[in-house]
Image (cartoon, grey):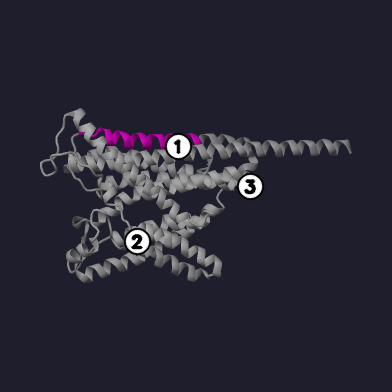
Amino acid sequence: MAQQSIGETRLARSSTSHTLSLYTVVKVRFISALIISLSSLICFLGTSWDIQWHAFVGRDRTLIPPHEMMLSGIGLSGIAALLLVVTETIWARQNRSSTKQVTPFAGLFSAPLGAYIAGYAALNSAVAFPLDTYWHSLYGIDVTLWAPFHVMIISGMALTGLGAAYLFASAANLASRIHAPGSKRTAYAGMVVAFATTLSLFMLLVFNGLQPDYTINLGFISLSLFPCLIGLLVGCILIAAASLLPWQWAATSVFGVSALFVIIDQLAIPPALTLLMQLEQLTFLKEQHATPPQISIVSVSWPLLTIVAAVLIDLVIQRAKKQNWSKRQLLTGLVVATFLCTIPVTVRSPLAVLNLISILGVAGVILSFALGFLGTFMGVQLGQGIGKTMRTLEG
């Protein structure tokens, strides 16, 4: 009887110790995800500054301040992800019962899936920087965001934000398991920020599709990739957030935080460019204004109908829950709600759809929106899949 009591005491102590270690893991994952999210925000502001710099000043050297800001964000997120992988691998080896809380990789590492995603994405961007410099030395200066290594850099930075979202989801699931509702709610809030950074960074690539130089000429017809790209992006990110977060206005919240980033961008980037030009005694390009720009190119190019799509996505999900819609009805409603954002409307060009018609012709516009519908459908399904995966991730 005494031996049984001693055994039960040891088991209780072991369980308590494991629970305490899980509390620590939740905190470590949350802090790492927060650092990576803030690093992604630094990358977003640095990239916007770089766009402004190239448009009004031009490219003069590799290590200009906007590039240094981008590299700082990339380096910080990569280091945070690496430290988390090493820390959790050590923890997993010391706690053999933690196999459900980590994702093994290559038989050597045991860490959250989000840490792998963020680490790989940061490495992807870091490798692309010297390759981009080499590209410019071979083919000269280009100002297009769709140059191969520009896409590689920005995509990597955006995926670090997605890795942070996975980390927050993992922390939320683990907090739910150990009955820590406060930590769970905080992790959900962190997910909104992480999704917003991902949306904002990918949007830098998407809105360039509205420019005439970015149309695809097939010989017999021309088309724009903007409807397809924005439908895929908004469907993926906002649907994932709305499917995962237990809030009525999850998609709208993600867009709201993204809009806050754009406001910060508008307030910070034009003065930063002007100050830097004065410090380095530079002048504007001849084809640009002789006076400092008062607007951020990124802020006035932001697709405005994304907010309408976000609100409609939340309303569709609320209606589906109340009326017990089937999966097909829900999918149809989400695709229709998301498809609205494929109509191009920006502060810079509120009648962009008319510009597309004049450039592409009616047939080209119809084909472009048909591709947009396909991209939206794929994005919604991908978003639902991501949300489903995150709900049970490493909990």
Question: Which comes sooner in the sequence, label 2 or label 3?
Answer: 3
Image quadrant assignment for residue 286: top left
Q: Residue at x 44, y 46 (%)?
A: 194
Q: Residue at x 29, y 43 (%)?
A: 266
| 364 vs 149, nearest the viewer | 364
Quarter of the image where the N terminus is located = top right
Residue 371, magenta (yes or no)? no
Residue 66, magenta (yes or no)? yes
| 224 vs 259, nearest the viewer | 259
Q: Amino acid at mark 3?
A: Arg
Give neighbour class at mark 2: few <14, some 14-19, many 20+ (Cα, 10 Å). Answer: many
Any part of residue 132 in sight: yes
The span from disc 2 to disc 3 (Cα, nearest Å) is 37 Å
Which element type, helix, strand or loop, lies under badge 1?
helix
> On the rendered structure, is 214 left or right of 36?
left
The residue that label 1 is drawn on is 35
Q: Amino acid at mark 2?
A: Cys
Q: Mark on residue 341?
A: 2
The residue that label 3 is drawn on is 177
> On the rendered structure, is 185 left or right of 357?
right
Residue 146: give x, y in percent of width and height.
Answer: 25, 50
Magenta highlight range: 61-84
Image quadrant assignment for residue 121: top left
Residue 390: give x, y in percent of width and height.
Answer: 52, 52
